[in-house]
Structures are given as C-alpha cells and as structure tokens.
C-alpha cells in the first residue's frame, strides 16, 4: 500500500471508508477515559472524516495528518473554515482555530511539529496499513505523541476471504504491537451486520490503550 494507492483513491474519489456522520464508537466511548475540555486529540490518517468536526463541536482541539491535499481541502470546505497554509518542506500545515492538519506522510511528522497530544483517535488508520508498515507506524505514533492514550478501532476477520484495507488485526496482533508500551482494554466488540464489505464475517473492536 504505497502513497500512490491513496493519492489515486482521492483523485478518483473512491472513498468507500468515508462516513457521513461521526463514528458510532467514537461517540459512544469518548468518555471511556474522560478528557478535560480543550484537550488535544490527534487524528492520524484522517481523510476528511466527520469525526474532526464532531470533536471540535465537543470542545476539543484537533491535530490531524493526511497524505492527500484533496482530502484536506474538502475537510476544510466541509467545516466551513478557510485554512492558513504554511509550507514546511515535506509537509504542509493547514491551520484554523483549534485545528492543525499536516498534509504529507505521517512518518515525516516530528514531535515538535505535532505538539502536545492528549488522545489519539485511530479509526481506519492503523488497519489501513499493511502488515510490514504497521509496527513502524505504532512505534512512530508512540514517539510523536509521547505515548498518549489511544482509542483504536480494529477488525478481526479471516484475511484469506478478502484483501485489505482494512486489514484484519486480531487481538493477538494488538497485544504484540502495543503491549510493550500500552495496557489495553477492550471497550466493545460486535459482529458487523452482513460481514465486512458484505463478504467476510467480521468483528469490529474498540480498544483503549494507555501508557504503561
Ligand atoms: C481508510 S482511509 C481513512 C480515513 C479516515 N481515518 C476516516 O476514518 O475516514 C486512510 C487514509 O489514510 C491516508 N494515508 C495513507 N497513508 C498515509 C500516510 N503514510 N501518511 C498520511 N496519511 C496517509 C489516506 O490518504 C487515506 O485518506
């Protein structure tokens, strides 16, 4: 899954993952580990998710990262914000009140650029990355967020039935990837009605990961 895969998806407007409302598990579990108003939530690999507008409406500040500038221009249009844009070399910084978005490869963001993070909200981000990138991504996020707590949504299904993304990341893999740095709590698990993409019986799971 290289950069061109995602850039093409945005250019061709093939956005099967995009949801018209904030994610039901974010809405249900935002208070699982309550955060004070004004806390800063990191949304990696954000696309144009409506979760960002929802988090802002709840009084949180948001910092996000996304490869595609098309996505982020659509995100700001959708929010009704005109961004201030700064060129940082490999990244662009789109800014509006309470919102910072870095456009470029998430692996190019350093902790100073990202700034403080109180919670990482990972929906369709870790599971969007193939096996060989995932451990690197988990380590990078732990580094740039100073191991801030994470809310992670994952899927568990038979990978031989369909190709990802989203990839299957069952509990054993969650434990192997995050276990050294975070404790994990399974907040919720359910069978996806009709299966993933209507093909593979699958469970969707929500995890709260907290610094060890
Ligand atoms: C499956 S989509 C999910 C988007 C969003 N989280 C949501 O729930 O709607 C994955 C997104 O990650 C972005 N992406 C993929 N690799 C990336 C990388 N290395 N750095 C930043 N963004 C990336 C893609 O462009 C795409 O918008």
Image (spheres, helix red, strand yellow):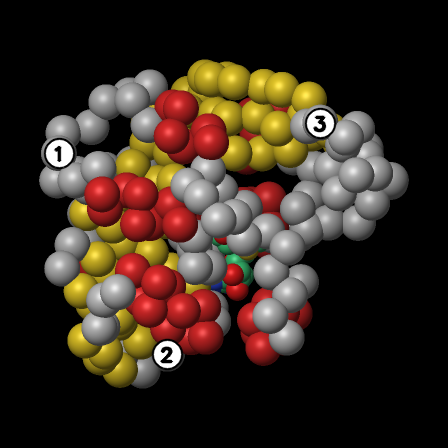
* Quarter of the N terminus within the rendering: bottom right
Q: Is residue 211 left or right of residue 137?
A: left
Residue ID for mark 1: 37
Q: Residue at x 64, y 65 (%)?
A: 14
Q: Secondary structure at mark 1?
A: loop
Q: Residue at x 33, y 49 (%)?
A: 52
Residue ID for mark 3: 193
Residue ID for mark 2: 90
Q: Nearer the viewer, residue 51 or 65?
A: 51
Find the distance from the CA under tag 2 to the CA under tag 1.
32 Å
Q: Are marks 2 and 1 in contact (CB under 8 Å)?
A: no
Find the distance from the CA under tag 2 to the CA under tag 3.
41 Å
Residue 141, given in percent of the width and then of the height, sits at 39, 47
- Quick one: label 3 or label 1, which is nearer the N terminus? 1
Residue 154, given in percent of the width and then of the height, sits at 58, 34
- Quick one: label 2 or label 1, which is nearer the N terminus? 1
Regarding residue 206, the answer to whether it shows in the image is yes
Judge the density around disc 3: few (<14), some (14-19), many (≥20) Cα neighbours within 10 Å: few
């Amino acid at each position: 899954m290289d950069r061109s895969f995602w850039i093409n998806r945005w250019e061709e407007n093939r956005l099967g993952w995009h949801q018209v409302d904030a994610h039901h598990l974010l809405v249900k579990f935002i208070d699982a580990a309550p955060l004070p108003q004004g806390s800063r939530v990191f949304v990696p690999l954000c696309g144009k998710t409506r979760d960002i507008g929802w988090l802002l409406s709840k009084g949180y500040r948001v910092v996000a990262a996304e490869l595609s500038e098309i996505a982020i221009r659509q995100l700001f249009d959708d929010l009704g914000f005109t961004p201030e844009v700064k060129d940082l070399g490999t990244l662009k910084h789109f800014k509006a009140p309470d919102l910072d978005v870095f456009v470029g490869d998430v692996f190019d963001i350093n902790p100073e650029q990202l700034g403080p993070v109180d919670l990482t909200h990972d929906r369709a981000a870790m599971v969007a990355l193939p096996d060989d990138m995932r451990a690197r991504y988990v380590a990078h996020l732990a580094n740039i967020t100073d191991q801030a707590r994470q809310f992670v949504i994952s899927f568990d299904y038979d990978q031989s039935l369909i190709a990802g993304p989203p990839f299957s990341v069952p509990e054993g893999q969650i434990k192997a990837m995050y276990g050294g740095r975070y404790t994990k709590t399974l907040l919720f698990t359910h069978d996806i009605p009709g299966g993933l993409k209507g093909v593979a019986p699958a469970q969707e799971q929500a995890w709260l990961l907290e610094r060890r």
